[in-house]
């Protein structure tokens, strides 16, 4: 029996087979969870429907997190399928305008770019947690989001996305504090760089992958399967004592101080 047997999970953020959300769906399905999915727009609908069908799910709901109406409608719709609630919410959503994640931090900085990055990448977690709250309450449920090292270190090109991820990680802690008394845990996985559609927008991404392969303690990048396994664990009762945490799945890269210096 899988360690998520009997759990119901809503997965956001599938844009392709390489999406981190796809790795999470795979692991959660393998461990016995029932899955439901959201898609951002019509372009992605058929891809997400295909993924859902592979996991035996017919719950596929539109959700653009910039719309309050769509957030509300998403949980109304989910409640029609899972009438007595659900257990797991996976938030795998981020966006910053391309010019804001190229060049130096100040080059692409505008009030609008800053706002969009924070709205889609951080506020959406809190907004979804608020909307999901009545359906997750009292079920030992779990909310999981995805962060990156740029939340706490200055990384070339990550720019305003790093500031939004810092906000996301703080949001994880405030949500964990708020929702803990009703049994809901809130955590993040801080993943190492993985080649996905979102990552393709980051300037010099190939160089970043090479740097991790050369310098991370494990001398390799991480896969969506590795992230998926940790996400599944954190959302399971095996992690019943864990909330408000940022867990690294990055081949150990985050522990390093200086990179590229070898001693004999
Ligand atoms: P991806 O492009 O496969 O997924 C990003 C998802 O965000 C897409 O499914 C897209 O539809 C969704 N999205 C964007 N704007 C949205 C909106 N307005 N409403 C609803 N959905 C929206 O890329 P990914 O790398 O799998 O990204 C998933 C998460 O993992 C993101 O939070 C990302 O920052 C994080 N992350 C990625 C990496 C990496 O290197 N790929 C590393 C650490 C963290």
Image (cartoon, grey):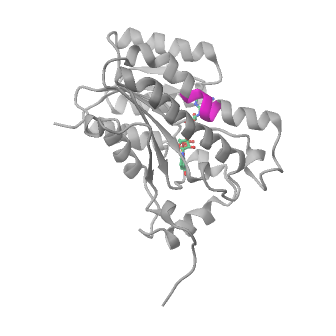
Which span is picked out in magenta? 120-125
Question: Which quarter shows the N terminus?
Answer: top left
The quadrant holding residue 186 is: top left
In the image, is residue 188 part of the stretch drawn in magenta?
no
Q: Residue at x 55, y 26 (%)?
A: 126
140 horizontally vs 72: left or right? left
Q: What residue sits 49% from the left and 48% below the top?
A: 190
Q: Position of residue 173 (x, y in %)?
A: 50, 35
- Give the tally of numbered discs: 0
229 lies left or right of 98: left
Is 12 located above or below residue 215 in the figure? Answer: above
Position of residue 111 in the picture relative to residue 191 (left or right): right
Q: Residue furthest left?
A: 1
Residue nearest the viewer, comparing 19 with 115: 115
Residue 11 visible in the displayed image: yes
| Pick the front one: 152 or 18 | 152
What secondary structure predominates along the stretch shown in magenta? helix
Residue 40 shows in the view: no
Nearer the observer, 6 or 257: 257
Q: Where's ligand 1: which quadrant?
A: top right
Q: At 67% across and 44% down in the image, what residue appears?
A: 163
Q: Position of residue 12 (x, y in %)?
A: 48, 30
Residue 229 x, y percent position in the rendering = 34, 46
In the image, is residue 123 part of the stretch drawn in magenta? yes
């Amino acid at each position: 029996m899988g360690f998520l047997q009997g759990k119901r999970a809503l997965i956001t953020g599938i844009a392709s087979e390489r999406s981190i959300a796809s790795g999470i769906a795979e692991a959660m399905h393998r461990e016995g969870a029932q899955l439901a999915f959201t898609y951002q727009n019509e372009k992605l609908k058929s891809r997400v429907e295909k993924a859902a069908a592979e996991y035996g799910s017919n719950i596929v709901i539109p959700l653009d997190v910039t719309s309050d109406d769509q957030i509300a409608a998403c949980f109304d719709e989910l409640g029609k399928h899972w009438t007595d609630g659900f257990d797991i919410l996976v938030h795998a959503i981020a966006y910053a305008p391309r010019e804001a994640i190229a060049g130096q931090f100040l080059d692409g900085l505008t009030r609008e770019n800053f706002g969009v990055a924070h709205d889609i990448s951080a506020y959406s977690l809190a907004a979804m947690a608020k909307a999901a709250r009545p359906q997750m309450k009292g079920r030992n449920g779990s909310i999981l989001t995805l962060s990156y090292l740029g939340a706490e270190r200055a990384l070339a090109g990550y720019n305003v996305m790093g500031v939004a991820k810092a906000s996301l990680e703080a949001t994880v802690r405030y949500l964990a504090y708020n929702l803990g008394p009703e049994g809901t845990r809130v955590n993040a996985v801080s993943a190492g760089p993985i080649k996905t559609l979102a990552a393709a927008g980051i300037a010099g991404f190939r160089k970043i992958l090479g740097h991790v392969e050369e310098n991370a303690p494990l001398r390799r990048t991480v896969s969506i399967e590795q992230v998926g396994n940790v996400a599944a664990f954190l959302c399971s009762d095996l992690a019943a004592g864990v909330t408000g945490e940022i867990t690294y799945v990055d081949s150990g890269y985050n522990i390093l101080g200086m990179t590229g210096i070898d001693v004999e």
